[in-house]
Amino acid sequence: MPAQDVTAYLTQLLESVRGLDRGAPHDLPVHADADTDLLAVAVVDVDGQVWSAGDAEHLFPIQSMSKPAVYGLAIEHVGLDEVLRHVDVEPSGDAFNRISLDPESNLPDNPMINAGALVAHSLVHGPDAGDRFERIQELHSRMAGRELAMDQDCYEQEMERADRNLALAHLVKALSVLPDDPHDVGDGYSRQCSLEVSTVELARIGATLAAGGVVPGTGERVLAREATQQVLSVMLTCGMYDSAGDWVSQVGIPAKSGISGGIFGAVPGRCGIATYSPRLDAHGTSVRGELAFRRLSLDLGLHVLRPRRPQG
Ligand code: GLU
């Protein structure tokens, strides 16, 4: 499709979902106060071409959409085998903050739910908690193409309500292995979730994963191909929490949602995609964003499991 046609298509896509007013923003004040009319979509291909429509430069906290890159960073730092000794890769069908560890192994089911994300955060190497956060911030900044900053209000509000995540970190420490102090891990995880990104930047992060760990446009390698493949695999099977099965069958793009209202996906070898709209459904997924992804996937034939006839 010529570039201007893609932009026109994305603009029309947003108009086709704008009328949906189901759902509500997350009740964390920084999200509850968001303008629910904000709506954006962006696509970045693996060569770095960018298309967007709507409020694609508006900044919002990355929240759980930070989990994939942090998992990748943990794999880079300690190796996949070591990471798998601490966090499994089984879809749990649980809500993101479910107090759950596997009853036999005591491991978190996967790195996309909070229990596993806390462990992945703790596996990132650094002499102390501050250094670990800096490495996470640096990786996201390189992928996004801009020095990302933390939304201080979001961080403070997250910490005021961190009891559940802190309890999860303590539970992991008590029943299996958490390589660091649970409070430091909970604090660092809240900082990680508070990094501010735009929809275009999220699509760039997706495009970096789609390109096997190489930042589109700059050609800088930030994650190894093997680590990226592992990240994409858990995004496909576990990225959408308790609606992961529905997402895989209907959309078929490895993706991750966040309670701020963003969703980003990566179509291997092709592009990163992101949407933003603050109203969420019962699974914590953006209502308009999900429909936009469904339509995009169908219209552009992006389902990664789409059967194809052998050529020739
Ligand atoms: N900071 C949120 C939490 O851990 C992130 C949840 C999400 O975006 O899904 O509770």
Image (spheres, helix red, strand yellow):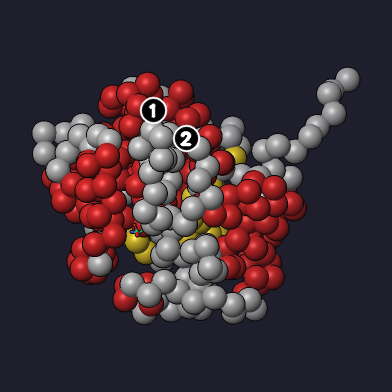
Q: CA distance from mark 2 to mark 1?
A: 8 Å
Q: Does residue 65 lie above or below 154 as drawn?
A: above
One can see residue 240 in this view: no
Residue type marked 1: Leu
Q: Residue at x 65, y 63 (%)?
A: 291
Q: Does residue 295 lie above or below 115 as drawn?
A: below
Q: Residues within 10 Å of mark 1 (few under 14, many from 20)?
A: some
From the top left corner, tell me how far across and down residue 232 is, in percent.
Answer: 51, 36
Q: Residue at x 37, y 21 (%)?
A: 81
Q: Does residue 95 lie above or below 236 as drawn?
A: below
The quadrant where residue 268 appears: top right
From the top left corner, tell me how far across and down residue 29 is, in percent.
Answer: 31, 76
Residue situated furthest front in the rendering: 104
From the top left corner, tell me how far across and down residue 93 is, in percent.
Answer: 53, 50
Look at the numbered disc 1 and say if its residue's Cβ is closer than 8 Å to ligand 1: no
Q: Residue at x 80, y 32 (%)?
A: 308
Front position in the image: 108 or 19: 108
Residue named by callout 1: 84
**Which image quadrant shows ligand 1?**
bottom left
One can see residue 172 in this view: yes
Q: Are marks 2 and 1 in contact (CB under 8 Å)?
A: yes
Front position in the image: 4 or 208: 208
From the top left corner, tell me how far across and down residue 136 is, in percent.
Answer: 27, 42
Look at the numbered disc 2 and say if its residue's Cβ is closer than 8 Å to ligand 1: no
Viewed as shown, does residue 285 lie left or right of 214? right
Q: Does residue 228 lie above or below 42 as drawn?
A: above
The quadrant where residue 162 appears: bottom left
Front position in the image: 122 or 193: 122
- Quadrant containing the C terminus in the rendered view: top right
Q: Which mark is residue 89?
A: 2
